[in-house]
Image: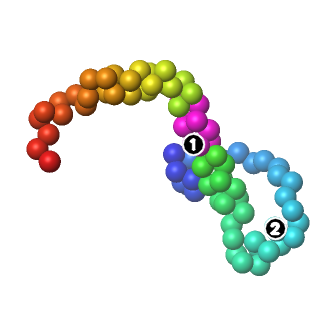
Amino acid sequence: MRPGDRSIQRKSTNLSLDARLVAEAKNLDINISRVAEESIARAVGEEKARLWRIENRRSIEAWNDYVERSGRPLATNRQF
């Protein structure tokens, strides 16, 4: 799902924003809804990535320990 994709279903919502900031955005022809959607999508992606790292931390640490002890798998096959 891409922010701004017209094929996705939209949900109306209310936001409380700094009135001066909204006025300035309107004067600059900034689409506040799209900017908010893009920012929320970015925040959701960052939080999902953070949670994934927490969830997979033990596996990543185990793999890193293995590589530290044993070297990179297939390293002998590297040609560069």
Tell me if residue 23 comes above or below residue 54 in the rendering: below
Give the colour scheme shown.
rainbow
Q: Earlier in the sequence, mark 2 or mark 1?
A: 2
Which of the 4 image quarters holds residue 23?
A: bottom right
Residue type at mark 1? Gly
Residue 76 relative to residue 53: left or right: left
Percent position of residue 5, x then y: 54, 54
Percent position of residue 15, x then y: 82, 52
Which of the 4 image quarters holds residue 68?
A: top left
Tell me if residue 35 comes above or below residue 59 in the rendering: below
Find disc 2 in the rendering and name its residue: 22
Residue type at mark 2? Val
Report the magenta stretch's main SS. Answer: helix
Q: Is residue 30 visible?
A: yes
Percent position of residue 45, x then y: 57, 42
Judged from this view, the residue extending furthest toward the bottom is 27
Magenta segment? 44-52
User: Is 51 part of what is drawn in magenta?
Assistant: yes
Calculate the distance from the C-alpha at mark 2 to the C-alpha at mark 1.
Answer: 25 Å
Which of the 4 image quarters holds residue 76?
A: top left
Q: Secondary structure at mark 1?
A: helix
Q: Nearer the viewer, residue 4 or 8?
A: 4
Q: Nearer the viewer, residue 24 or 64?
A: 64
Find disc 1 in the rendering and name its residue: 45
Q: Nearer the viewer, residue 3 or 64?
A: 64
**x 11%, y 44%: residue:** 79
* Mark 2 vs mark 1: in front: 1
